[in-house]
Image (spheres, rainbow, N blue to C red):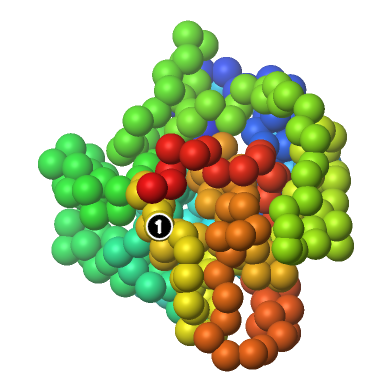
Amino acid sequence: MCVIAIKKQGVEMPNEQTLKTMWTNNPHGAGIMYARDGHVYIDKGYMDWTSFSERIKSLGDLTDTSVVMHFRIATHGGVIPGNTHPFPVSRNVIALTKLRGSCKVGVAHNGIISCVEPRKGISDTMEYIATKLAPRAEEDPDWYKDEKVLEEIGHEIKSKLAALDGDGVISYYGDFIEEADGMIYSNDSYKPRVYAKYTYRDAAPYTYSKNTRRLPWDTGRESAWLMPLCDIPVEWDFRDPKLRNIDVDDLWVDHFGALYVIDYDLALAYRLKGKNAPTLVRSVYFEDLFDWEDSIRFEIAGDVPPEYWV
């Protein structure tokens, strides 16, 4: 579900291995913002590790510079350069998609924002900035310095946020991890992950062999292209699943119609057994409804644990 890496002034940048780990665990694009000469400079849209790594090296020694980096796992909006973080605090969506630029305050987000409905093509973070955060910032330019305001924003977005201004002041809301070396992370995906070997099992009556592929990095897991079930333009008849701890609106689906639940913190998909997959109210070829362009590739970690079922 993305990771934010905060480096305050006087703290050394993470080593290349840590940067590479964050990229590997969050491979849908990266960006950086840093404070210099009273401005926040945003540099983002790096969709492969090599280009991002080379850009970081080209910036030289950043020890005395306040820096915020972001590595993305897409949940809303396409996997495209313009949807990567960080963002300027602006109502202008075009400004939010700009890959290079400067601003007074920049932000990066980790999580899912459900209090807004993102318009087509942009992420929930972008929608929130344009419609909620930017208007607030216009009324209160120092919003990010006020702990009470940050708490209000945090309760609204129910996720994590980091802000940087041109003077190098960094504010953040949420449960961040502070390391001994001074680095601050929004979750532990800066650490290498050790996966147990997962033996792929077919889940009748669906055939997953066409949908599952190895990820470009070898974790020993299979992967599937998924999209939110609520984005499929058809009514559903849930004949079986009686869900205890799963909101139906949070279900994801592959192009065969099989259901998954996502662990956003780990960016892993858990498959619901085939007998619990929904059936269409009317006869229709499900694959024709699946939007490959807006789908996201997740690792399959296995079946949903039984405690989620009544």
Q: Is residue 298 left or right of residue 94?
A: right
Query: Total number of numbered labels?
Result: 1
Q: Residues within 10 Å of mark 1 (few under 14, many from 20)?
A: few
Q: Which residue is at the front of the view, 276 or 31?
A: 276
Residue at 67% in and 25% down: 193
Q: Residue at x 86, y 62 (%)?
A: 210
Q: In this orientation, which residue lies closer to the viewer: 85 or 251?
A: 251
| Image position of 140 with respect to 98: above or below | above
| Amino acid tagged 1 | Lys
Image quadrant in which you'd find residue 301 = top right
Depth check, front residue: 273 or 19: 273
* Residue 305 visible in image: yes
Looking at the image, which residue sits at the far top?
180
Q: Secondary structure at mark 1?
A: loop
In percent of width and height, residue 36 lies at 49, 40
Residue at 45% x, 33% y is: 186
Q: Is residue 169 left or right of residue 220?
A: left
Q: Position of residue 144 (x, y in %)?
A: 26, 45
Q: Residue at x 47, y 71 (%)?
A: 238
Q: Which residue is mark 1?
A: 242
Query: Residue 272 at x, y = what percent?
Result: 58, 53
Left/right of residue 139 with respect to residue 159 in the rendered view: left
